[in-house]
Image (tube, rainbow, N blue to C red):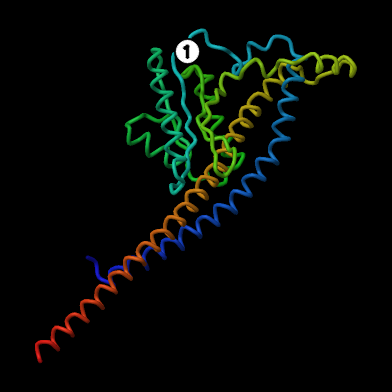
């Protein structure tokens, strides 16, 4: 049985750990609020970009020649881009992304296709390297607070591989933020850009007829060619923001649970320490009584 001093040392250690987990929980909560505000500020921009793309697409003629819209007749190679965090201590946040990415890998290979990898986040890079996957690039060090420039770099690399014909499609795997307690793993195919982006409904066509014709300078096809890379960057940026908010939510929840478990462990250790102290006192009393009996 452990001594009272052993229990005291363990209680002191758990209390110090609880201080750390509480601090991490508060930091994650503050970062989560900022991440949520960034997502809310980005949504109007993304919606306006979609409206602009569809509006120019209605005016353009043939757009099948645009590189980012070209659908491949046969899918031979898929580029998988898992978005993980740069740090741990976030529960299953990183594991569920890599698990879904490897499940996608198995499905693609079962169809006779080849998989290539583009790592985003230190945890994803280390997991893929450990599994001996060859990487076409790695982007790390910004997942806590991603910027638009980070999204541009990722989108440019993915578009480069797609346009050069090295891959036939690009799939993002990331956590979509639902709430601090819930993050949903999402697979999103970002290349080739779906033709549905350019499609419009009856209401939009009616509004165009009421507004009349527009004169585009330069031609709509040229404008669309410039807008599509920006649209791709916007999609990647939104996924990065979703992943960042999901990470902070997952870390806040994990640290809250850790603090709760530490409190329960302290209570159990305190109870065991009191029992050990009582046993020591009882043993001392028995020794005193035995000594007194021996003298009489």
161, 235: nearer the viewer: 235
Q: Is residue 284 above or below residue 236?
A: below
Image quarter of residue 8: bottom left
Q: Quadrant of the N terminus?
A: bottom left
Q: Is residue 119 above or below residue 202?
A: below
Q: Between residues 293 and 271, which one lies in front from this camera angle?
A: 293
> Tag 1: Cα neighbours inside 10 Å, few (<14), some, or many (≥20)?
some
Left or right? Give the position of 60 relative to 90. right
Position above or below: 214 against 90: above
Return the residue at label 1: 75
Q: Is residue 38 left or right of residue 183?
A: right
Q: Residue at x 58, y 36 (%)?
A: 151
The image quarter in which residue 5 lies: bottom left
Which residue is painted at 80% across and 21% down in the image? 217
**Element type at mark 1:** loop
In the rendered image, residue 60, in percent from the top left (x then y), is placed at: 74, 13
């Amino acid at each position: 049985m452990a001594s009272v001093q052993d229990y005291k040392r363990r209680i002191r250690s758990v209390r110090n750990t609880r201080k750390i987990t509480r601090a991490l929980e508060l930091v994650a909560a503050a970062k989560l609020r900022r991440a949520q505000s960034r997502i809310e500020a980005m949504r109007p921009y993304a919606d306006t970009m979609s409206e602009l793309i569809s509006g120019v697409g209605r005016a353009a003629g043939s757009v099948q020649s645009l590189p980012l819209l070209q659908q491949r007749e046969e899918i031979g190679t898929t580029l998988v881009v898992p978005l993980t965090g740069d740090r741990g201590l976030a529960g299953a946040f990183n594991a569920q992304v890599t698990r879904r990415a490897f499940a996608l890998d198995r499905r693609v290979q079962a169809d006779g296709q080849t998989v290539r990898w583009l790592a985003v986040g230190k945890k994803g890079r280390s997991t893929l390297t450990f599994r001996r996957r060859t990487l076409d690039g790695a982007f790390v060090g910004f997942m806590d607070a991603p910027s638009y420039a980070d999204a541009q770099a990722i989108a440019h690399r993915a578009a480069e591989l797609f346009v050069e014909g090295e891959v036939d499609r690009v799939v993002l795997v990331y956590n979509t933020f639902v709430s601090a307690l819930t993050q949903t793993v999402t697979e999103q195919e970002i290349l080739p850009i779906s033709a549905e982006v350019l499609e419009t409904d009856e209401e939009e066509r009616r509004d165009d007829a009421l507004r009349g014709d527009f004169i585009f300078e330069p031609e709509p096809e040229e404008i669309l060619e410039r807008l599509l890379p920006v649209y791709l960057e916007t999609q990647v940026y939104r996924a990065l923001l979703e992943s960042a908010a999901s990470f902070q939510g997952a870390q806040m929840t994990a640290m809250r649970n850790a603090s709760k478990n530490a409190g329960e462990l302290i209570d159990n250790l305190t109870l065991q320490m009191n029992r050990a102290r009582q046993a020591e006192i009882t043993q001392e009393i028995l020794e005193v009584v035995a000594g007194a009996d021996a003298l009489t």
